[in-house]
Image (cartoon, helix red, strand yellow):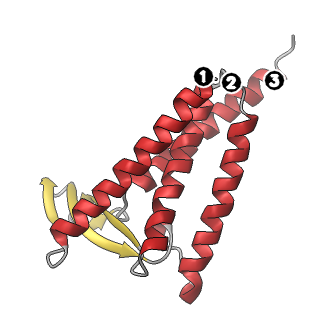
Amino acid sequence: MRKSRWFWPVAATLVLADCSTKELVVFELTGNPGPHTVIGDWIRVTLAYNTGAGMNLSLGAGSRIGFSIIAVAALGLLFHLYRRTDPGATLRAGALALVAGGALGNLLDRLRSSRGVVDFIDIGVGNARFWTFNLADLGVTIGAVLLAIVLWREDGSSREPA
């Protein structure tokens, strides 16, 4: 199946890159979390732990368990969508892989430590900063946008008259 040639390598690469960069940042920045300049004030590396979810969403004291359950359910849904994906739909498989790989990367982090998910990419100018995030978050975001485009195109092509 051509879709598997995209899904599994993309998902595995994202999980590996996400976990590796988080480990490296924790190793290097524990004790001096930053911010550390990468490209001027625009891109910095700052070690942060997020006990909630993206954009500082929180479920209070139950965030770790709650967001872990949500991630497992999302992974189940994503795998179901992957299985239903046409073997030749490589772009859709790649988009699903990015979302699934990102969800798995953050789930592993959440299960491994009660401190929360490691975030470290800090983008902005001066005090106008975006939320600190990681490679898993980037994969989920890019994958979700790509999946929305793919599904929108599939829906549009199915409505065209034959």
Against 10, residue 86 (above or below) is above
Tell me where residue 146 appears, x and y as whole percent: 55, 37
Asked if the residue under mark 3 is in contact with the one under mark 2, i.e. CB atoms within 8 Å, the reply is no
Q: CA distance from mark 2 to mark 3?
A: 18 Å
> Where is mark 1, residue-wise?
2
Tell me where residue 154 appears, x and y as whole percent: 72, 27
> Where is mark 2, residue-wise?
87
Q: CA distance from mark 1 to mark 3?
A: 22 Å
Q: Looking at the picture, which amino acid does disc 1 mark?
A: Arg
First in sequence: mark 2 or mark 3?
Answer: 2
Tell me where residue 18 appears, x and y as whole percent: 37, 53
Query: Image quadrant for the N terminus?
Result: top right
Q: Which mark is residue 158?
A: 3
Q: From the viewer's perspective, tell me whether residue 5 is left or right of residue 152.
A: left
Image quadrant where residue 162 sits: top right
Q: Looking at the picture, which amino acid does disc 3 mark?
A: Ser
First in sequence: mark 1 or mark 3?
Answer: 1
Whether residue 34 is visible here, answered yes or no, is: no
Against 83, residue 124 (above or below) is below
Closest to the observer, 18 or 153: 18
Asked if the residue under mark 2 is in contact with the one under mark 1, i.e. CB atoms within 8 Å, the reply is yes
Report the residue at 46% width, 43% height from top.
12
Image quadrant where residue 74 sits: bottom right
Report the residue at 47% width, 71% height from top.
110
Category of crowding for the residue at label 1, using alpha-carbon neighbours closer than 10 angstroms: few (below 14), some (14–19), many (at least 20): few
| Element assignment for label 1 | helix
Category of crowding for the residue at label 2, using alpha-carbon neighbours closer than 10 angstroms: few (below 14), some (14–19), many (at least 20): some
